[in-house]
Image (cartoon, rainbow, N blue to C red):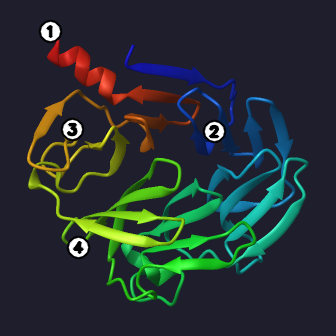
């Protein structure tokens, strides 16, 4: 099976943001400001707009978004709902990854030209909110927009950035950054995942519904079909997470490709 769907008993509520691993372990921010996980639910006393939620560890979770009356956008809570700290995570966030005990934030083009961290294109923070890396402020060049990111192994991330659409690889142990040119077959992709040295992209400017397998050299295979009924992002291992107002699904893109090419 190339896709597994997990419905949530939302009733009249809606999922505002959700993160999950390939096994269906999830954390979600609901429209009534409740945080749902596989293990339970808790109600937040604060109101957030445009927020994303990520698990940090067994004791803490992260919300990045606009809390009414608070300037900083990064908020760390424990699982009783107690806020532990607030930090400057910038604005116009595109995506957030938690990898190697660090928080990686990418930014939309609206943030271009802003002061760090927003203007960095990609910024890295520790769990106390200290910024450890900034792409632009660190002298690595200008990022107008980060189209997508995903985890790579246990201590790195991949990012697909504009302009020019290079594939960036950032190692979080020492912030070593490498850059690789990409092919035009999947130009404009809005999600990517990694599997055994290969990269799978979702959609392109010319084809909004297909996946593209790339060996990071000279070979590309177009396959599958993705209906854009929810938000999608890569979670590693050749898999994508997609969610809508009341459910989420894990798409195994590599299994989908195997099934298609074995016919």
Looking at marks 4 and 3 on the same chain, the residue that comes earlier in the sequence is marked by 4
Distance from the alpha carbon under mark 1 to that under mark 4:
38 Å
Looking at marks 1 and 4 on the same chain, the residue that comes earlier in the sequence is marked by 4
Report which quarter residue 84 is drawn in: bottom right
Question: How far across and down, in percent of the image, does residue 83 sit?
Answer: 86, 63
Report which quarter residue 6 is drawn in: top right
Q: Are marks 1 and 3 in contact (CB under 8 Å)?
A: no
Q: Which mark is residue 14?
A: 2
Q: Label 1: how many residues lie within 10 Å, few (<14), some (14-19) or many (20+)?
A: few
Residue marked by disc 4 = 163
Closest to the observer, 219 or 45: 219
Q: Are marks 2 and 3 in contact (CB under 8 Å)?
A: no
Q: Label 3: how many residues lie within 10 Å, few (<14), some (14-19) or many (20+)?
A: many
Q: Which mark is residue 213?
A: 3
Closest to the observer, 18 or 20: 20
Closest to the observer, 168 or 89: 168
Looking at marks 4 and 2 on the same chain, the residue that comes earlier in the sequence is marked by 2
Q: What residue appears at the point 65 percent right and 58 percent down from the top-left corner?
A: 101
Task: Label 3: state its secondary structure.
Answer: strand
Task: Label 4: state its secondary structure.
Answer: loop
Distance from the alpha carbon under mark 2 to that under mark 3:
33 Å
Residue marked by disc 1 = 263
Question: How far across and down, in percent of the image, does residue 111 sit?
Answer: 44, 79
Discs 4/3, front? 3
Discs 1/4, front? 1
Discs 2/3, front? 3
Q: Quadrant of the C terminus?
A: top left
Looking at marks 2 and 3 on the same chain, the residue that comes earlier in the sequence is marked by 2
Q: What residue appears at the point 70 percent right and 27 percent down from the top-left corner?
A: 11
Question: How far across and down, in percent of the image, does residue 4 sit?
Answer: 48, 20
Q: Residue furthest front?
A: 174
Q: Label 4: how many residues lie within 10 Å, few (<14), some (14-19) or many (20+)?
A: few
């Amino acid at each position: 099976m190339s896709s597994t769907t997990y419905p949530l008993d939302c009733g009249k509520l809606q999922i505002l943001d959700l993160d999950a691993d390939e096994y269906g372990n999830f954390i979600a921010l609901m429209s009534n400001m409740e945080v749902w996980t596989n293990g339970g639910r808790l109600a937040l006393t604060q109101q957030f707009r445009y927020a994303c939620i990520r698990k940090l560890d067994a004791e803490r979770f992260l919300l990045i978004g606009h809390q009414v009356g608070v300037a900083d956008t990064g908020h760390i809570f424990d699982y009783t709902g107690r806020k532990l700290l607030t930090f400057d995570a910038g604005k116009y966030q595109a995506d957030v990854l938690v990898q190697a005990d660090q928080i990686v934030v990418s930014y939309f083009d609206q943030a271009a030209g802003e002061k760090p961290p927003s203007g960095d294109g990609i910024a890295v923070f520790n769990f106390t909110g200290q910024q450890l890396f900034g792409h632009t402020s660190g002298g690595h060049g200008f990022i107008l927009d980060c189209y997508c990111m995903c985890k790579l192994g246990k201590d790195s991330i991949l990012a697909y950035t504009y302009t020019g659409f290079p594939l960036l690889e950032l190692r979080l142990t020492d912030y070593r950054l490498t850059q690789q040119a990409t092919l035009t077959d999947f130009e404009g992709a809005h999600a990517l995942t990694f599997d055994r040295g290969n990269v799978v992209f979702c959609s392109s400017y010319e084809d909004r519904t297909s996946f593209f397998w790339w060996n990071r050299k000279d070979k590309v295979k177009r396959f599958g079909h993705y209906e854009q009924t929810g938000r999608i992002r890569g979670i590693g291992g050749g898999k994508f997470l997609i969610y809508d107002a009341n459910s989420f699904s894990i798409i195994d893109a590599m299994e989908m490709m195997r099934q298609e090419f074995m016919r």
